[in-house]
Image (tube, rainbow, N blue to C red):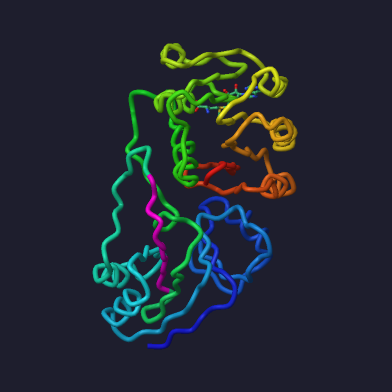
Amino acid sequence: MILSPLEGRVYQGVRGFETHLKEEIGGYKASWGTLYHGKAVKGPVFWNQNVWRAPFRMEFGSISEAAKALREIQRNWAPVLFTQFRRGALIRSQLPPLSHKPRPFPWLAPDVPMGAWTLADPHTIIASAQCSSPFPGGIIEFEEDKQGPPSRAYLKLWEALVRCGAWPGPGDRCLDAGASPGGWTWAAARLGAEVLAVDRAPLEERILAMPGVEFIKHDAFTLKPQSIGPIRWLLCDVVCYPPRLYQWIARWLDSGLCENFICTIKMQGLPDIETTRRFAAIPGSMVAHLYHNKHELTWMKVRDA
Ligand SMILES: C[S@@+](CC[C@H](N)C(=O)[O-])C[C@H]1O[C@@H](n2cnc3c(N)ncnc32)[C@H](O)[C@@H]1O
């Protein structure tokens, strides 16, 4: 068995948005499915499902030899296969099991390393013990609520909160901008938070009827932080050009009136990389493409994350 480190990173692209990733990493040496092996880019890379931070190549003879070598490094290894599925399944069967059960919310992700591996050919594994996502292969599924929320948009909020390891609690004052039809408001109100929902479109009646929910029909961006007052969480899923969102968030940051932020940066046409970088440069924050995001990224800034 020969194990050799690979210089740089392996970036796992998001299906449908691989072009965005390729532009960000500026070329790559090799690829396997949606995995791209390139140099370690300075600064954050946004359009990925997972970054393999310490990749290596392992040439092996037998399936049990490969599984043993991975087990000796650490417990958790998520397969990300694009070829050699049968062989991959055999290796996987000799690794400690990973739970693929949908998670309840709230859920605190265990703080343990989550590795990832793929098969480049029958006798070559590409793997990394350290990855950017705490979820196997960058994937998290939740136990969905098919009755309560009016749409599935709440899933990306849940995922962001799990990534941050924090969520609104009973009595926490939240502003939900771009709240309609009410998925994020439902998610926060269900945790016992006091939610001020703002949208130019109406909130669903049954969401409005939830305890702690108040609604104002307004352009979120013309609301001044000082007129809202102190809030624990600012949640924003407004469809708008990213610079518009950035200007408004900058006012909130300057005001010091909000502790925690979860905002979707929606891309209109080509991704706005310049504004995304400005968001990512805000101290204590992170921008990621979440598993539940579409053509959008999520900016998260949570005080104790
Ligand atoms: C993707 S939807 C939000 C979905 C919501 N988070 C949910 O879970 O149901 C985007 C919302 O942004 C609202 N919106 C767009 N521009 C806005 C603005 N300037 N102020 C407030 N809301 C706005 C739209 O009316 C729309 O309801």
Q: How many marks?
A: 0
The percent position of residue 183, horizontal first and vertical second, equals 46, 26
Q: Can the viewer see residue 55? A: yes
Tell me which residue sits at (37%, 63%) in the image: 78
Q: Can the viewer see residue 271? A: no
Provide the residue span drawn in magenta.
108-119
Quadrant assignment, res 222: top right
Q: Is residue 115 magenta?
A: yes
Quadrant assignment, res 218: top right
Q: Nearer the viewer, residue 171 or 271?
A: 171
| Displayed-image quarter of ligand 1 | top right
The percent position of residue 76, horizontal first and vertical second, equals 35, 65
The percent position of residue 281, horizontal first and vertical second, equals 70, 49
The percent position of residue 92, horizontal first and vertical second, equals 29, 68
Q: Nearer the viewer, residue 199 or 283?
A: 283
Q: Is residue 193 magenta?
A: no
Tell me which residue sits at (40%, 28%) in the image: 191
Using the image, determine if residue 304 lies above or below residue 177. Answer: below
Using the image, determine if residue 22 lies above or below residue 29. Answer: above
| Relative to 65, 188 lies left or right | right
Using the image, determine if residue 225 lies above or below residue 291. Answer: above
Tell me which residue sits at (60%, 42%) in the image: 299
Q: Nearer the viewer, residue 56 or 227?
A: 227
Tell me which residue sits at (45%, 54%) in the image: 138
**Placement of the N terminus among the 4 image quadrants:** bottom left
